[in-house]
Image (cartoon, rainbow, N blue to C red):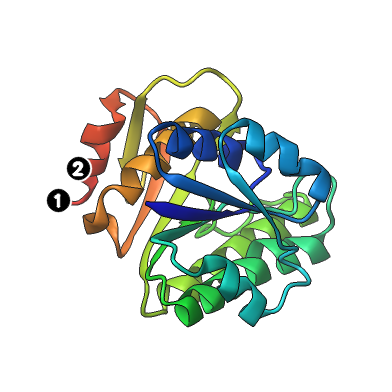
């Protein structure tokens, strides 16, 4: 497959790019900082310079030409304010969907977050609340399109080593999941077209990734 990943220098994205390249897929990472290109090359990926807060839809569609799937794994990141939660976590996801449709790429995986359907708890940091609102707005836009979309909502992310075992269902209790296991699940979702149209929550658990993905389609 040829897979284009938005937010290509993010932690999950680099793990995903490494897995895809390692099994022989063409893994393309969209980055906004040219200094990050070498990090993608080091994991076997092809870096493409495209700032999702500035690039036009036609230019972005050109970068997606010939792709079998796109993955939105971008995020404004720690330290960013509420405004960038909207321009990256929402607007960039929408832009990628626009470009995918223009380029004729039907498969779209959106990395979202657990908790987006629940009202922020009292005392929730306003920037984090803006992040959750942006993620939910991105979900609402993408899931309303004629695309073969899958939404993945990971729990609290950790940098622990992968376990290879998860709980992947439409709703799961709050918990943590390693970024490496998120990447592994994304690879499995790319290989499972029957997961199109599903919104799935993810935490670490007891079920091997491949089995969890198969079970989620039943």
Is residue 52 placed above or below 194 in the rendered structure?
below
Q: Is residue 197 above or below residue 162?
A: below
Q: Position of residue 167 (x, y in %)?
A: 33, 34
Residue at (70, 79) in percent of width and height: 56
What residue does disc 1 label? 218
- Does residue 48 appear anywhere in the picture? yes
Residue ID for mark 2: 214
**Residue 68: x %, y % from top left:** 38, 61
Number of marks in the rendered image = 2
Is 8 on the left or on the right of 177, as rendered? Answer: right
* Front one among 9 and 85: 9
Where residue 96 appears, as percent x and y from the top left, is 57, 69
Dividing the picture into quadrants, the one containing residue 138 is bottom right
Task: State the SS at label 1.
Answer: loop
At x 38%, y 42%, the residue is: 187
Q: Are marks 1 and 2 in contact (CB under 8 Å)?
A: yes
> Looking at the image, which residue sits at the far left?
218
- At a point 74% along the width and 54% down the height, the residue shown is 76
């Amino acid at each position: 497959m040829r897979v284009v990943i938005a937010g290509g220098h993010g932690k999950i994205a680099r793990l995903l790019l490494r897995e895809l390249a390692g099994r022989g897929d063409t893994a393309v990472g969209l980055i906004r900082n040219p200094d990050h290109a070498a990090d993608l090359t080091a994991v076997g990926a092809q870096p493409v310079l495209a700032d999702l807060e500035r690039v036009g839809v036609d230019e972005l569609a050109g970068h997606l030409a010939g792709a079998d799937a796109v993955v939105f794994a971008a995020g404004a990141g720690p330290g960013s304010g509420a405004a960038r939660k909207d321009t990256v976590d929402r607007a960039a996801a929408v832009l990628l969907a626009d470009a995918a449709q223009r380029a004729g790429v039907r498969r779209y995986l959106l990395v979202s977050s657990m908790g987006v359907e629940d009202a922020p708890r009292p005392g929730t940091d306003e920037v984090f609340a803006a992040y959750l609102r942006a993620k939910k707005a991105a979900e609402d836009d993408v899931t309303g399109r004629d695309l073969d979309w899958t939404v993945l909502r990971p729990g609290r992310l950790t940098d622990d080593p992968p376990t290879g075992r998860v709980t992947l269902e439409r709703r799961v209790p709050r918990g943590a999941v390693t970024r490496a296991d998120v990447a592994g699940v994304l690879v499995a979702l790319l290989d499972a077209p029957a997961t199109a149209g599903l919104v799935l929550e993810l935490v670490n658990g007891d079920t091997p990734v491949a089995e969890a993905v198969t079970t989620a389609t039943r």
